[in-house]
Amino acid sequence: MRRFLRIYLPFCKMGVQQMLAYRFNFIFFLVGEMLSSVVMYFVWLAVFNSSEGETFMGFSMTDMTVYLFVSFAVGYLTYSEGSYAVAEEIRDGSIAMRMIKPVRFDLPFLFQEIGSRSVTALIVIVPICTLVEVYRFAVTGAVVFNIVNFLLFLLSLVIAYLLSFYINVCYGFMAFFLKNLWGANVLKDAIISFLSGSKIPIAFMPAALQTVLNFLPFSSLSYTPVMIYMGMYDLVTIVQKLTLQLFWLAAFWGLSKLIWLQATKRLCVQGG
């Protein structure tokens, strides 16, 4: 374990330094994403105001507000640039240097992102969760925060990030075949954003589609952690959802190994 940490912790430190070095880029991007959440809040406010009852598809406006901002935080923290990083190294040929180094192909990417995400978590999770709980207290007049749900939420959030990372690594390996993934990555992000429930709760979908989406790995990226935080699941359901998250994490981790073994045989460096 000591040798493992000695090898990979410098990548984690590099991720922290990279985040701090480009802090204004991070801040402006964060503000832009927050403004997007505020716009979505007013869109849903109009939807609820036009509905006949106080709830819509089982959600009150208070629930929807909490869902929007916690979903934003979860999506921001679980977002992985693994597909972009892997695809870029394949495109410019620098992946060849990684292949001859005595490190696993995925862990340098992973630890570098963990370093940057640790900084992001302190800046995003604490303020947003605090504001959400203040908002819920102001609306309901009661303390809704549940420490057990919050700890389970953090556990689910960690699994969701690891799952997101390995999904993106698997996707990034397509660059071995397609050479350039920039446009395909944009499409992939849009599709995952919809299927994960980060824009529209899966509970709002038709029943048959809900069944499919709840089983697919994408709901584990955003919808599951957010619903756990909101207390929408009982303990049995939470255990089932966490188990499903671990299943998909193991599946994509294994898939990344298989694709790596096959794809490296097709390495073709562009431009020499």
Image (cartoon, grey):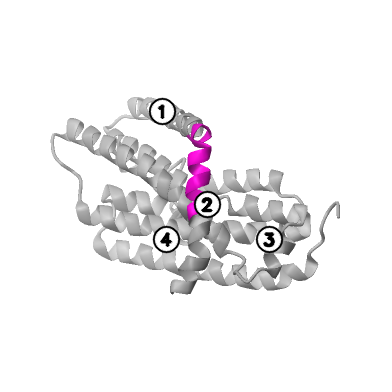
Q: CA distance from mark 4 to mark 1?
A: 27 Å
Count how many numbered circles sit on residues in the image.
Answer: 4
Near-viewer residue (215 or 11) = 11
Q: CA distance from mark 3 to mark 1?
A: 35 Å
* Magenta portion: prevailing SS class: helix
Magenta-highlighted residues: 13-26
Instruction: Please tell me whether residue 20 belongs to the stretch shown in magenta.
Output: yes
Q: Is residue 82 left or right of residue 88?
A: left
Residue named by callout 3: 173
Please report contact status of discs 4 and 1: CB closer than 8 Å, yes or no: no
Identify residue type, mark 4.
Answer: Ile
Task: State which quarter of the image contains the N terminus.
Answer: bottom left
Dot 1 crowding, Cα within 10 Å, few <14, some 14–19, many 20+: some
Residue named by callout 2: 14
| Quadrant of residue 152 within the rendered picture | bottom left
Is residue 94 visible in this depiction of the protein? yes
- Residue 214 pos. (x, y %): 44, 57
Identify residue type, mark 2.
Answer: Met
- Residue 85 pos. (x, y %): 64, 52
Secondary structure under the numbered disc 1 in the rendered image: helix
Dot 2 crowding, Cα within 10 Å, few <14, some 14–19, many 20+: some
Q: Is residue 113 above or below residue 41?
A: below
Instruction: Please tell me whether residue 117 belongs to the stretch shown in magenta.
Output: no
Residue named by callout 1: 38
Residue named by callout 4: 159
